[in-house]
Amino acid sequence: MTDLHTLKTKIEKQVVRIKKAEHDRPNLLSQTIYIGTLGLVMVLPVIAGAYLGSWLDGMMAGYSMRWTLSLLLTGVVIGILNVYFLIKD
């Protein structure tokens, strides 16, 4: 009789665990939002670096792309780090 009770308890625990796993499974909307967030945290530093670099190059006399390129590359590095830390969590 105790073996039957123990088996019933184990099965009930497994059913609860399976139902919780089905409920917590990511759906299409949450995955889409996650991918969109990854895109934004990658692209925004790149755009900000390019814009700031272009503005700084415009303040200098003559034709120069020094600030634009350096801040663009800095934005790429920051974007990659943002994505890495977001995925890590």
Image (cartoon, grey):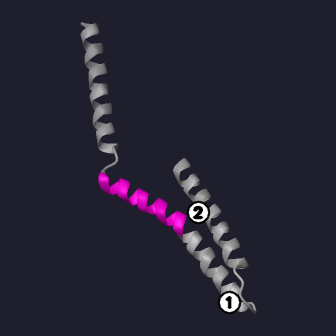
Task: Estimate the x, y position of residue 82 in percent, counting from the top left.
Answer: 58, 59
Name the magenta segment's main secondary structure: helix
For marks 2 and 1, the one nearer the N-term is 1
Label 1, secondary structure: give it.
Answer: helix
Viewer-proximal residue among 89 and 64: 64
User: Mark 1, residues whose alpha carbon is within 10 Å: few (<14), some, or many (≥20)?
Assistant: some
At 71% from the left and 78% from the top, the residue drawn is: 67
In the image as oriented, which residue stretches furthest toward the front? 63
55 vs 2: above or below: below
Amino acid under label 2? Answer: Gly
Toward the viewer: 20 or 44? Answer: 44
Horizontal and vertical percent position of residue 26: 34, 47
Q: Is residue 41 magenta?
A: yes
Residue bearing mark 2? 79
What amino acid is at disc 1? Gly
Relative side of 55 to 43, left or right? right
Residue 63 found in image quarter = bottom right
Magenta includes 30?
Answer: yes
Q: Which residues are magenta?
A: 28-43
Residue 68 in view (yes/no)? yes
Q: Quadrant of residue 49?
A: bottom right
Q: Is residue 19 left or right of residue 62?
A: left
Which residue is rendered at x = 30% and y = 32% of the image?
18
The mark lying in front, picked from 2 and 1, is: 1
Q: Which mark is residue 58?
A: 1
Q: Secondary structure at mark 2?
A: helix
**Left or right: 50 as drawn, with respect to 18:** right
| Residue in view at x 33 percent, y 37 percent | 21
Q: Position of residue 37 (x, y in %)?
A: 45, 62
Q: Position of residue 3 (x, y in %)?
A: 28, 8
Count of numbered circles on the image = 2
In the rendered image, the quadrant that contains the N terminus is top left
